[in-house]
Amino acid sequence: MGRFKRPASLTFLLVTAAALGAYLFVRSASLGLGAAAQARSPKYIFIFLSDGAGIAGMEAARMYNRVVHNEGLNIPDKIMKQGSLGLITVHPADSLTTDSAAAATAMASGCKAKVGSLGLCANGSIPKTVMEVAKDRGMRIGLVTTSTIYDASPAAFTGHVADRKFFSLIVDQYLRLAPDLLLGGGRDQFIPQNQPGSGRKDDRNMIDSFAKQGYAYVSDKKDLSRAKGNKLLGLFTLQEMSFELDRDKEPSLAEMTESAIRFLEENNRRGFMVFIENENTDAAGHMTDVASVIHAYREFDRAVGLAYDFYRKHPRETLILVSSDHDTGGLGFTLALEEPSGRHAKRMAATETDLKKIASISISLKKAAEILGPHPTSDGVDRLMKEHFKGFTLAPDLKRMILAKQLPGRSIYTDPVANTLGMMIANNTQVYWAASGHTSQPVFVAALGIGSELFRGYQDNTDFAKHLFTLLREKNSE
Ligand SMILES: [Zn+2]
């Protein structure tokens, strides 16, 4: 890491941060809110990220909850209604469309990065992340994800590597920084190479190394709910955690969030900053799997609801931020003409029936592709349709594509079987996908609590980190 220059930009950031902080102070004074009445900096900071699911993912979940469960959604109903709302750009330094590493670097460090690089600015400097600064300020820090714990988004909030695929290096950096809490999948990078399922290329047992550093280690839901101590490492799967639709014994995102809040709040005078991510919203978007996006988003929203309950208990000390790193798939529901033109052209419009149909899907498309295996058979496809997609029809050309495992066009698809099943669902429900990859749409930032007004309006994704630096700097001067 020595070959990277220390950041010249950090000084600039802190100067900017100080200026903004001064503005905020003057503003709150002019509103008659003195420092005694209104804390200037949040003691508890929640950063919620639904990977790959921006406005489209939230809106699909909101409509689904209304139609299928007659329920609202915490994010629009509580966080957005009572807090501030902004939009942020997603583009990285070297492209119009981002990956999770560059986007999370911008949001965690305040500088544009190149696609694939993590915790490094495009100019070669190594910035400090908001989590590192929070730790310097004496706050407890935690990372929670449904992905592998070393995946790009959580890793960019604490780590610095030239390539997001340097997984072992990311885990080594976690050990050095020692966050107070790490919960997610990805045990494969913590076990030595001679153990089954290991992803490491050395003999280090990182679970032992973390234990030596004072970490309690848990690997299932029950132990997680009882976990006590100073530091906690929870690894629940070898690789990514299951999609919500397929989840069985693993803890849900809301269960991990509940444990994280309990754990980080205990014996804690200086507060905490916790990053909580649902990665499955992105993975499902790549698979063009609308049911999995909706179920993952609903679980994400439940986790946000727990933070909202916490905020209600500590309204003058808490900041909740809910955002995404980018959109995946360009998801929506169509209103289109069945025939391209003509007097008798019939309209096709998505209706509530389509959402109810989606509710009957009992499996993720990732799992469906796994069930069909590397050589799908006609009987296997028929059985899958009957068991998991009741009331859906599979067009003969789509069935042929599944059996051949081939989609027309070049390799723009993530998984030929899953993406073809995605088309089948689309044909049956008027779901529309623009792509099976990331799009360049801006994403929303919903903010509630102390400092939330900073996140209002149309901003750059680097501003997300800059505002957090501002608030953390205020904390130091308290
Ligand atoms: Zn992605």
Image (spheres, rainbow, N blue to C red):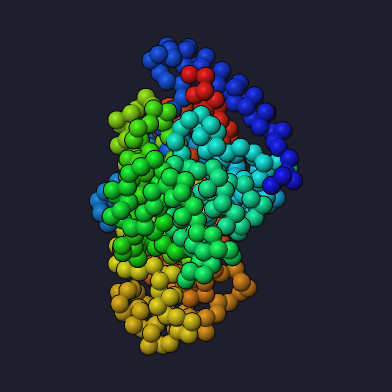
The single residue placed furthest to the left in the displayed view is: 70
Foreground residue among 343 and 322: 322
The spot of residue 344 in percent (x, y) is 44, 69
Above or below — where is 429 with respect to 456? below
Q: Is residue 68 left or right of residue 47?
A: left
Q: How far across and how far down the image is residue 305, in percent?
A: 32, 42
> Picture coordinates of residue 465 (x, y %)?
56, 36
Q: Residue furthest front?
A: 212
Residue 461 in the image: above or below residue 36 = below
Which quadrant would residue 384 be assigned to in this image? bottom left
Residue 336: in sight, yes or no? no
Instruction: Tell me what residue is drawn at x 66 percent, y 45 percent.
Output: 120
Depth check: give the residue in front, 149 or 376.
149
Query: Going by the image, does 378 lie left or right of 157?
Result: left
Quarter-of-image position of residue 293: bottom left
Q: Nearer the viewer, residue 226 or 215?
A: 215
Q: Is residue 138 left or right of residue 162?
A: left
The answer to whether residue 376 of the structure is visible from this angle is: yes
**At 55% from the left edge and 21% from the top edge, which residue is drawn?**
21
Query: Does residue 400 lie above or below 216 as drawn?
Result: below
x, y (%) of residue 126? 67, 41
**Residue at (50%, 56%) from the top-left corner?**
206
Above or below 140: residue 174: below
Q: Residue at x 41, y 62 (%)?
A: 237
Q: How many marks?
A: 0
